[in-house]
Amino acid sequence: MGVDYYNILKVHRNASEEDLKKAYKRLAMIWHPDKNPENNRDAEAKFKQISEAYDVLSDPQKRQIYDLYGEEALKSGQFPPPPSSSSRPGGFAHNYQQHYYNNNRQHPTSFHFNPRDADDIYAEIFGSESNGTSSDGGSGGARGFGRDGFFRATGGGSGTGSSKKAAPLENVLPCSLEELYKGAKKKMRISRNVYVSTGKFRTLEEILTIEIKPGWKKGTKITFPEKGNQEPGVIPADVIFVVDEKLHALYKRDGNDLVVNQEITLLESLTGKTLDLTTLDGRNLMIPLTDIVKPGAEVVVPNEGMPISREPGRKGNLRIKFDVKYPSRLTSEQKSDLKRVLGGIS
């Protein structure tokens, strides 16, 4: 039969689609050329062999032809004539072929083998792992940074089957309110153990890029699939970064709104004032106060709050809460003047 694709993937001949996918993922994680810089040429050859085996066995038509006639016939597209039911039995292979043709009217005489690209298969199975995916909410066991500044993707999960996946590894991602307002890119350096072709483990350092979207909230999770340590028989853990919001000197976030506390004098509360605030994206925001401002009053400025991540172009409100500062004492003359000015006001 030539190349034994079943043996390459370490699966039984009756392996299901899910069995094939699990076997491919386990071997691809070990033999991908990017994970074997010291033995790149051999790893690339092995990786292509694994990909070809998965390509053939995961495709029903290719697998049937391979099972009946082998690798050479599959790749050449040339097959022997269909067996006759009256011909002398030739053991299991003859009976298998006879059963196949009893249930399939067309003999595959015009099949053309078109192998898929190994990188395309890898991308389809694993998805894009260079950029994290984000989600809101959730919690898990946190992991911290070591003294050397590396995120240690250690621990997590156990098991002996390839279907077992290590528990996710979470780490806090502190973000300033400005970063959550405008968006930002953060580069996080991780260090993890990977299994190499020699059968040993080595430490791999990697830079993960996290793109903070405007409007993300505390608790948003950015997931990098299977970036944890590799262990035999265990699918590596996902590495998850959880957004945390740093305190800001002026603004406080309340959902999609921004809240700022502003103290004004009694005179300003009565006669008016123009507030000059610097927004989180550096603009000067002029807010005139023309009405009398009572203690505890709140002025709402529409569309000057936080961006709403799921509704591009929309923002929450800016809410300004006022505290009126009263004088600690008044002279007799000041009291008289106030009585004269305010005496007729109710």
Image (cartoon, rainbow, N blue to C red):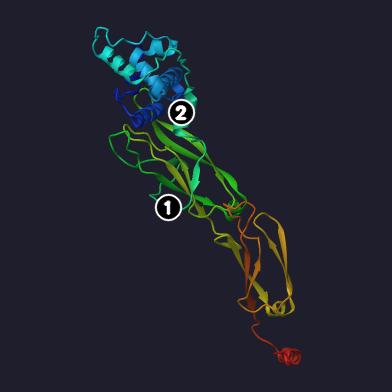
Q: On the image, numbered disc 2 is attached to which residue?
A: 122
- Label 1: element kind: loop
Q: Residues within 10 Å of mark 1 (few under 14, many from 20)?
A: few
Residue type marked 1:
Gly
Identify which residue is drawn at 66% across, 54% down.
281
Nearest to viewer (mark 1 / mark 2): 2
Q: Quadrant of the N terminus?
A: top left
Q: Which mark is residue 192?
A: none
Q: CA distance from mark 1 to mark 2?
A: 29 Å
Frontmost residue, 180 versus 163:
163
Q: Quadrant of the C terminus?
A: bottom right
Q: On the image, numbered disc 1 is attached to which residue?
A: 138
- Label 2: element kind: helix
Residue sitting farthest toward the front? 86
Q: Position of residue 104 (x, y in %)?
A: 36, 20
Q: Would residue 53 be seen by someone viewing this image from the given angle?
A: no
